[in-house]
Image (spheres, rainbow, N blue to C red):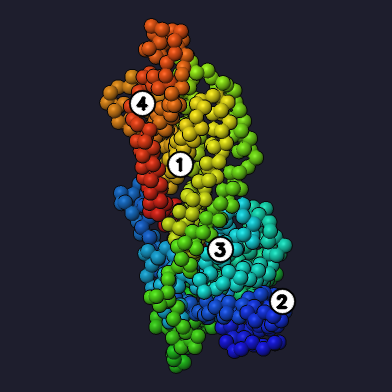
């Protein structure tokens, strides 16, 4: 990069048509305010360090995408197609020999009827869901490699975010996670500001995503992917659900990006004529095959050569879509015509002597397809798109990833769980419980009530937390999968961060509950015992949460997860011996080992009757030494003879801790290996 002068310097950013005009603020030699002028006349102000601007520019080499004879075949369960079929699977061709070439600075539209394979082609070109794919795909002169992920952005059709975050928070967390280590934090934040301006979302920057409009959400979705300054941008129906003004505004944003040298490929459903004409290239698909590839303005002329003339004053995009939505015969005719015309065009371009035998010159409206060896080997911008071995697969290390994800999880959990409603629930229930067990005397007849207090304590909060845990992954998973598909972070950092960030939030309310209910009920006046009961309660909460996370991660269907959780919990309570004292031996023997409620309850019972408290005898129903002396007293630990609490307090804790570790590990493994959806193309 040439040295910056005070004004109007041209900086080589590797990006066309963008002049970086710098003014160096006095006293600061490391940061420079740039006014970036776009071709359309818009200006964007950012404050990036000189090194930061260079590092960002280096992230984005110009890339030509070439694909040749790309096909995709999947095996579909035969019953899905023909219920009477005897076969297990039937082959289905989703893409059939599709070819094309897209250059930097171009916006290419993929159009066609619903189910024609637009998303499949986008996914395939973007290196996603590659099983069953044949053919060649090049990025400049290189074939797809996972490590190119960071240069390719994929904007999904659905706007998937943590909607409680504000627009700026969403972009900031993404920038901190996805921009590489050698950019300073200030530069990452400057990049966020730049994207906010570039996508014209400044006025909603501090609004939670759940409150912004559909068009703004779409721009945030695009902005999230643009933060890393990718070279190629794939968009799946970005205008769907937008009104025509928002759609045009969005296309303006895409045009700005194309002007910067990005290669843009977007599927689109029913564009207005203005948007339709603005594409540089149109690829029309039907049943996975190309039926037209050329300039949008040539599409009507091309179809007219086959006798399909658009009525005057008709939106060309509508006409084209009507045509490809016609019956099978017309679609087959269009597919065959494309095959013939592309051959004619190819032959003509190779040798002018060969004359077409077809009666039309339709081929002149088609863009010639690249031949198999036509990767962009001559592109002067060719740089190695695959990082060298010593470059990490991840933009930042495990610990920084974990810290950022920790902050995000903390903010999110805080917002969803530290609500007034949850506090009212905890405090209200604590007072009601305290009133029910109010100031129990230290007397023999309170032994069953003291036991039921512990039972309530060790079941209510664990059950409550388990249900929260159960819902956690089914909702977050789709966001995590999206973020991980773009190579944002390791699953292990996410999991560790989530576990650490959510624990304090999960533990505050049960602690508050216990502080109130325990002392109102007069359980045991020893403060050490109170702390030990609290530790067991919190341990039980963590074990239950882990079990909830495990079920939520292992079972793809939330309904199934809830059903399994209910059956499991009730069974664990029953076999734990809480309701039936004389369980059949064969059931009780293993049952008491499985029930995590049992361990926490057992330990707390022992704790409650510890400390040498003197109890008053009543009628000897529970304590044998009172039988002959109803007016006497007994030591609190004698109450335990009524219960089957054989295991020591320490051992109970160890088992609970072991269960916590096992359930958490299994939850992580399930999240890693059980996929949310069955690999839709
Ligand atoms: N994993 C899969 N199993 C079965 N069928 C699939 C799978 N993935 C894709 N398909 C089928 O492949 C065809 C192409 O799907 P694709 O999503 O690419 O279409 P599309 O053109 O993007 O459609 P739309 O415009 O409705 O989004 C559809 O008929 C779809 O049902």
Distance CA(mark 1)–CA(mark 2): 53 Å
Distance CA(mark 2)–CA(mark 3): 25 Å
User: Contact, CB < 8 Å: mark 2 with mark 4?
Assistant: no
Give the quadrant of residue 230.
Answer: bottom right
User: Contact, CB < 8 Å: mark 1 with mark 2?
Assistant: no
* Residue 139, image x, y percentages: 45, 77
Distance CA(mark 4)–CA(mark 3): 51 Å
Within 10 Å of disc 4 (Cα), the crowding (few <14, some 14-19, many 20+) is: some
Within 10 Å of disc 1 (Cα), the crowding (few <14, some 14-19, many 20+) is: many
Please tell me whether mark 1 or mark 2 is closer to you in this view.
1
Within 10 Å of disc 2 (Cα), the crowding (few <14, some 14-19, many 20+) is: few
Judging by the rendered image, the residue that carries numbered circle 3 is 174
* Residue 311, image x, y percentages: 66, 69
In the image, is residue 42 above or below residue 92? below
* Residue 125, image x, y percentages: 46, 70
Residue 84 seen in this snapshot: yes
Judging by the rendered image, the residue that carries numbered circle 1 is 542
Judging by the rendered image, the residue that carries numbered circle 4 is 645
- Residue 96 located left or right of residue 119: left
Distance CA(mark 1)–CA(mark 4): 22 Å
In the image, is residue 556 above or below residue 176? above
Distance CA(mark 2)–CA(mark 4): 76 Å
Q: Earlier in the sequence, mark 2 or mark 3?
A: 2
Q: Residue at x 59, y 86 (%)?
A: 12
Q: Nearer the viewer, residue 342 or 496?
A: 496
Judging by the rendered image, the residue that carries numbered circle 2 is 42
Mark 2 CB within 8 Å of ligand 1? no
Residue 286 seen in this snapshot: no
């Amino acid at each position: 990069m040439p040295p910056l002068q005070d004004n109007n310097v041209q900086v080589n950013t590797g990006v066309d048509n963008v002049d970086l005009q710098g003014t160096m603020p006095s006293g600061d030699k490391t940061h420079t305010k740039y006014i970036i002028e776009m071709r359309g006349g818009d200006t964007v102000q950012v404050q990036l360090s000189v090194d930061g601007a260079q590092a960002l520019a280096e992230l984005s080499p110009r890339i030509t995408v070439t694909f040749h004879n790309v096909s995709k075949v999947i095996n579909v369960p035969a019953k899905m197609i023909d219920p009477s079929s005897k076969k297990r699977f039937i082959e289905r061709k989703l893409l059939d020999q599709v070819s094309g070439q897209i250059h930097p600075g171009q916006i290419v539209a993929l159009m066609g009827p619903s189910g024609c394979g637009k998303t499949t082609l986008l996914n395939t070109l973007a290196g996603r869901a590659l099983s069953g794919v044949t053919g060649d795909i090049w990025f400049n002169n290189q074939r797809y490699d996972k490590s190119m992920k960071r240069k390719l952005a994929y904007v999904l059709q659905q706007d998937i975010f943590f909607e409680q975050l504000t627009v700026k928070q969403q972009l900031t967390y993404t920038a901190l996670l996805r921009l590489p280590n050698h950019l300073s934090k200030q530069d990452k934040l400057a990049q966020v500001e730049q994207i906010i301006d570039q996508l014209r979302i400044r006025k909603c920057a501090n609004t939670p995503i759940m409150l912004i409009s559909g068009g703004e959400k779409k721009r945030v979705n695009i902005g999230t992917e643009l933060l890393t300054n990718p070279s190629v941008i794939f968009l799946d129906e970005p205008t769907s659900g937008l009104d025509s003004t928002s759609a045009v505004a969005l296309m303006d944003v895409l045009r700005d990006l194309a002007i910067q040298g990005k290669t843009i490929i977007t599927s689109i459903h029913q564009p207005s004529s203005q948007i339709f004409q603005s594409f540089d290239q149109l690829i029309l698909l039907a049943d996975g095959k190309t039926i037209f590839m050329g300039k949008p303005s040539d599409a009507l002329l091309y179809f007219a050569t086959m006798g399909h003339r658009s009525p005057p004053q008709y939106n060309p995009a509508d006409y084209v879509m009507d045509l490809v939505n016609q019956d099978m015969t017309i679609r087959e005719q269009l597919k065959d015509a494309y095959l013939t015309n592309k051959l004619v065009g190819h032959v003509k371009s190779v040798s002018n002597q060969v004359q077409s035998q077809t009666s039309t010159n339709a081929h002149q409206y088609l863009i010639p397809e690249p031949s198999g060896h036509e990767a962009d080997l001559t592109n002067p911008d060719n740089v190695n798109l695959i990082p060298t071995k010593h470059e990490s697969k991840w933009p930042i290390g495990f610990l920084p990833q974990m810290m950022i994800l920790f902050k995000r999880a903390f903010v999110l959990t805080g917002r969803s769980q530290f609500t007034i409603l949850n506090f009212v629930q905890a405090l209200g229930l604590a007072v009601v419980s305290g009133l029910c067990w109010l100031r129990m005397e230290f007397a023999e007849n309170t032994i069953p009530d003291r036991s039921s207090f512990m039972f309530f304590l060790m079941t209510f909060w664990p059950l409550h937390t388990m249900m929260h845990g159960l819902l956690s992954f089914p909702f977050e998973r789709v966001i995590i999968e999206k973020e991980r598909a773009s190579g944002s972070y390791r699953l292990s950092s996410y999991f560790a961060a989530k576990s650490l960030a959510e624990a304090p939030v999960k533990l505050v309310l049960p602690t508050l509950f216990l502080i109130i209910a325990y002392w109102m009920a007069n359980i045991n006046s020893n403060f050490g015992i109170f702390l030990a009961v609290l530790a067991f309660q919190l341990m039980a909460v963590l074990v239950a949460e882990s079990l909830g996370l495990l079920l939520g991660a292992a079972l793809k269907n939330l309904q199934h997860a809830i059903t399994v959780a209910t059956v499991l919990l009730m069974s664990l309570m029953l076999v734990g011996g809480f309701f039936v004292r004389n369980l059949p031996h064969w059931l009780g023997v293993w049952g008491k080992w499985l029930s995590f409620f049992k361990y926490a309850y057992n330990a707390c019972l022992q704790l409650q009757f510890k400390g040498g408290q003197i109890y008053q005898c009543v009628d000897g129903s529970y304590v044998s030494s009172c039988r002959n002396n109803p007016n006497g007293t007994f030591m609190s630990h004698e109450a335990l003879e009524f219960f089957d609490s054989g295991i020591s307090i320490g051992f109970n804790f160890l088992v609970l801790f072991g269960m916590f570790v096992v359930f958490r590990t299994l939850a992580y493994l399930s999240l890693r290996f059980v996929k949310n959806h069955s690999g839709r193309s």
